[in-house]
Image (cartoon, grey):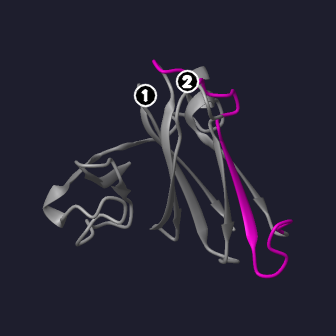
């Protein structure tokens, strides 16, 4: 899948154009390069072990236990098979998008964190995408409807 990748922080714009400034590190538009940056499964109905470790698994919870009104929880973990979080192989970050527009980045560190994140969204509808970046196997995407 093509995207515009920030050469400074690795953010990937998936809305079809490079932003004037990176929403993560604020690098200028000139820091972006269009390339085939996001991996998707070869056969979504028959995932390989590598794909099962890298494709995000997203759970949308319509009722939030923390913010009772106007909140949708989103839980994301890396893979059907839990991805390792070791210094030599780990998930660097997870970026979240609603309707192809960036909303948040969660940075993960090996040894101390599990390969997962959660958000409390104001949005009640739209298409949510999570893109994770593995230090060895690159970026992988999963999309769901809110």
Quadrant housing residue 128: bottom right
At numbered mark 1, what does the secondary structure look like: helix, strand or loop?
A: loop
The residue tagged 1 is 137
**Left or right of 132: which side holds 65?**
right
Kind of element beneath mark 2: helix
Q: Is residue 116 above or below residue 80?
A: below
Measuring from the top left, give residue 85's x and y in whole percent: 57, 26
Report the front residue among 90 and 97: 90
**41 relative to 2 in the view: left or right:** right
Which residue: 63% across, 35% down? 113
Q: Is residue 4 above or below residue 83?
A: below
Q: Where is residue 36 in the image (x, y as percent from the top left)?
A: 30, 44
Question: Is the C-beta separation of discs 1 and 2 under 8 Å?
Answer: yes
For residue 60, which quarter of the picture? bottom right
Q: Give percent across and percent down for residue 132.
A: 50, 43
Residue 33 visible in image: yes
Location of residue 87 with respect to 103 vertically, above or below? above
- 129 falls in the magenta region: no
Residue 65, disc: none
Q: Nearer the viewer, residue 18 or 84?
A: 84
Label 1 crowd bin: few (<14), some (14–19), many (20+), radius 10 Å? some
Judged by its main secondary structure, the magenta piece is: loop
> Relative to the observer, which residue lies in front, 131 or 38?
131
Foreground tag (1 vs 2): 1
Expressed as whole percent of the image width and height from the top left, the position of residue 79 reads 65, 34
| Start-end of magenta stretch | 64-88
Residue at the image point whose x is 67% and y is 77% from the top: 122
Say whether disc 1 or disc 2 marks the residue closer to the N-terminus: 2
Residue named by callout 2: 50
Between the C-alphas of marks 1 and 2, the distance is 9 Å
């Amino acid at each position: 899948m093509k995207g515009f990748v920030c050469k400074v922080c690795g953010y990937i714009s998936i809305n079809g154009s490079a932003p004037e400034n990176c929403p993560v590190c604020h690098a200028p538009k000139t820091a972006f390069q269009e390339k085939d940056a996001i991996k998707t499964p070869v056969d979504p109905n028959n995932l390989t072990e590598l794909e099962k470790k890298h494709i995000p698994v997203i759970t949308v919870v319509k009722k939030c236990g923390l913010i009772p009104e106007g909140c949708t929880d989103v839980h994301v973990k890396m893979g059907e098979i839990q991805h390792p979080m070791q210094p030599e192989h780990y998930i660097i970050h997870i970026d979240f998008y609603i309707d192809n527009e960036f909303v948040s980045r969660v940075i993960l560190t090996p040894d101390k964190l599990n390969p997962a994140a959660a958000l409390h969204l104001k949005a009640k509808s739209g298409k949510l995408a999570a893109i994770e970046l593995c230090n060895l196997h690159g970026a992988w995407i999963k999309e769901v409807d809110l």
